[in-house]
Amino acid sequence: MARYTRIPGSIALITLMNPPVNALSAAVRQGITDTVGRAVSDPEVKAVVLCGENGKFCGGADIREFAGPMTGPPLIPMIDAIEAAEKPVVAAIEGIALGGGLELALACHYRIAHVKARLGLPEVTLGLLPGAGGTQRLPRLIGVPAALDLIVTGRHVSAQEALKLGIVDQVTDGNIQEVAMEFAQSMSATLNSRC
Ligand SMILES: CCCCCCCC/C=C\C/C=C/C(=O)SCCNC(=O)CCNC(=O)[C@H](O)C(C)(C)COP(=O)(O)OP(=O)(O)OC[C@H]1O[C@@H](n2cnc3c(N)ncnc32)[C@H](O)[C@@H]1OP(=O)(O)O
């Protein structure tokens, strides 16, 4: 599931909740779909921050659901709806953003990573491709050679390497949610001043 919190200053904070790694189970995908829709349709909300509970952004597909039939909202429309949001959406990446978790972050408009975070697309190690937009969004962001390296090796990168490659916009050793909310607030103020 996902928790929706309205923060004073017109920010909606969406927290992925699925221990141990906040994987994208059917309930989490439903939670993200519902809370993003709520944030987008609330005129008081000017920007959105997406984070994960307990120091982990998202470990990707929930491997516990691989054995059964797929239920819940499909991943791609959920991710596309985030990219299409007409309000800045910031991913606050702490711990891990792997597989579908990184694809989720790539659909956000900005990404802030904690200095200890690790990011990657390990799908290849499971015999899969990053099929939720990762093979498009990552090359657009960092170029084909660097994206191919991550996609075909499945290796994890540190927050600092992610910053150098251009996957994340900022790295912090502070409180990731506070930093991301401050960033979201300033992005929303910048966008509004241009309108
Ligand atoms: C047919 C139905 C399919 C439905 C799916 C549809 C939705 C999305 C579909 C596709 C797109 C996305 C694809 C992907 O995301 S593929 C990538 C999936 N993720 C991974 O491969 C990550 C695998 N995990 C790891 O690399 C590591 O576990 C770690 C780096 C996250 C953490 O490492 P470490 O700190 O060493 O801890 P452990 O390895 O011991 O793990 C702790 C604990 O967490 C559980 N766990 C880890 N990953 C997942 C996961 N993705 N889903 C669920 N649970 C996960 C792990 O099993 C341990 O549990 P415990 O033994 O009970 O403690």
Image (cartoon, helix red, strand yellow):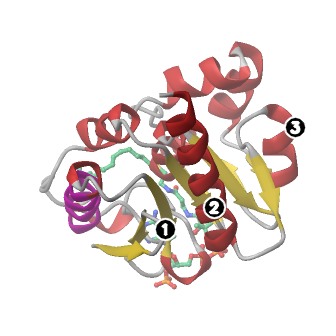
- Cα–Cα span, label 2 and label 1: 13 Å
Q: Earlier in the sequence, mark 2 or mark 1?
A: 1
Pointer 1: residues within 10 angstroms few (<14), some, or many (20+)? Answer: few
For numbered disc 3, what is the local secondary structure?
Answer: helix
Q: Which mark is residue 9?
A: 1
Q: Which residue is mark 3?
A: 164
Q: Is residue 7 above or below residue 37?
A: below
Q: Is residue 22 above or below residue 37?
A: below
The x, y position of residue 162, in whole percent, is 78, 43
The x, y position of residue 126, in whole percent, is 49, 46
The x, y position of residue 142, in whole percent, is 72, 24
Q: Earlier in the sequence, mark 2 or mark 3?
A: 3
Asked whether the viewer can see residue 121, the reply is no
Q: What residue sits 35% from the left and 57% below the top?
A: 45
Quarter of the figure that contains the N terminus: bottom left
For numbered disc 1, what is the local secondary structure?
Answer: loop
Residue 69 image-quadrant placement: bottom left
- Cα–Cα span, label 2 and label 3: 19 Å
Q: Nearer the viewer, mark 2 or mark 3?
A: 2
Q: Main secondary structure of the magenta part?
A: helix
- Cα–Cα span, label 1 and label 3: 31 Å
